[in-house]
Amino acid sequence: MSIIVSPSILSADFANLERDIKLVEDAGADWLHIDVMDGHFVPNITIGVPVVKSIKGVTQLPLDVHLMIENPEKFVEAFKNAGADIITFHYEAVKDVLSVVKLIKSFGIKAGLSIKPNTPAKEIFEFLPHLDLVLVMTVEPGFGGQGFMHDCAQKITEIKQKAPEKLIIQVDGGINNVTGHICTSLGANSLVAGNYIYNHMSPSQAIKSLR
């Protein structure tokens, strides 16, 4: 499987969001990563359903929506209706993982499960056969521009060993050409990068370097 590059709009200029989405679309992005934060599950607030709906109207890229929120099951339908193609929620945010996975899939879209840096990979092994995507966070979720936590990378190997062949293993947090290569060499096949792509002199070269 080739590496799926999903630029994070958390690093875009929100006053020029359409421009910055087109920038990465033209640069060869595969997906668009959208971080939704509620100020409760993580200590930051970003965007919600209306902005995702607006984004859907200006891009052909699949919308890779990462819900860093409490009670994600309450918002699945709204984000699907807004245009989400993939919805990823946090293991730490729910009591019944499989019910949320089934809910997401009932709308005909991909279901992802994310784990924070302090959550061991083994906590989610039982869910792997039911998922389309696993997101390994290599920073504490909440803010862009943080440094890559190298001790989290070994989770990629652990998940890869237990995962069905079709599972997308995505990594987010401090990803650049160096840390991205570490992740893909361990078995990741999707990389989320914000600052590295948006602050690069050539976003297309940045995306190529991640592949």
Image (cartoon, rainbow, N blue to C red):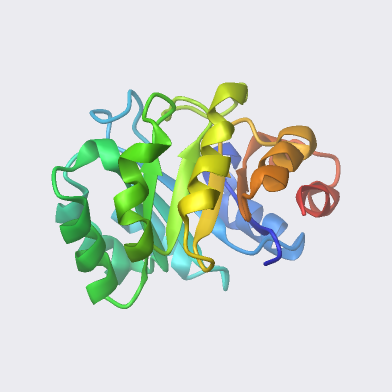
Image quadrant occupied by the N terminus: bottom right
Residue 178 location, x and y as percent? 78, 34
Residue drawn at 76 percent across, 48 percent down? 210
Residue 3 location, x and y as percent? 69, 59
Residue 23 location, x and y as percent? 71, 56
Is any part of residue 146 visible from this angle?
Answer: no
Q: Is residue 22 above or below residue 8?
A: below
Image quadrant occupied by the C terminus: bottom right
Q: Is residue 28 above or below residue 184?
A: below
Asked whether, in this view, residue 179 is left or right of residue 189, the answer is: right
Residue drawn at 45 percent across, 58 percent down? 133
Is any part of residue 85 visible from this angle?
Answer: yes
Frontmost residue, 6 versus 112: 112
Asked whether, in this view, residue 128 is left or right of residue 5, the answer is: left
Q: Is residue 159 above or below residue 37?
A: below
Quarter occupied by residue 109: bottom left
Residue 22 location, x and y as percent? 66, 61
Farthest front residue in view: 161
Asked whether, in this view, residue 210 is left or right of residue 141, the answer is: right
Q: Is residue 50 above or below residue 192?
A: below
Q: How many numbered circles does the render carry?
A: 0
Residue drawn at 32 percent across, 78 percent down? 108
Farthest bottom residue in view: 108
Frontmost residue, 12 versus 174: 174
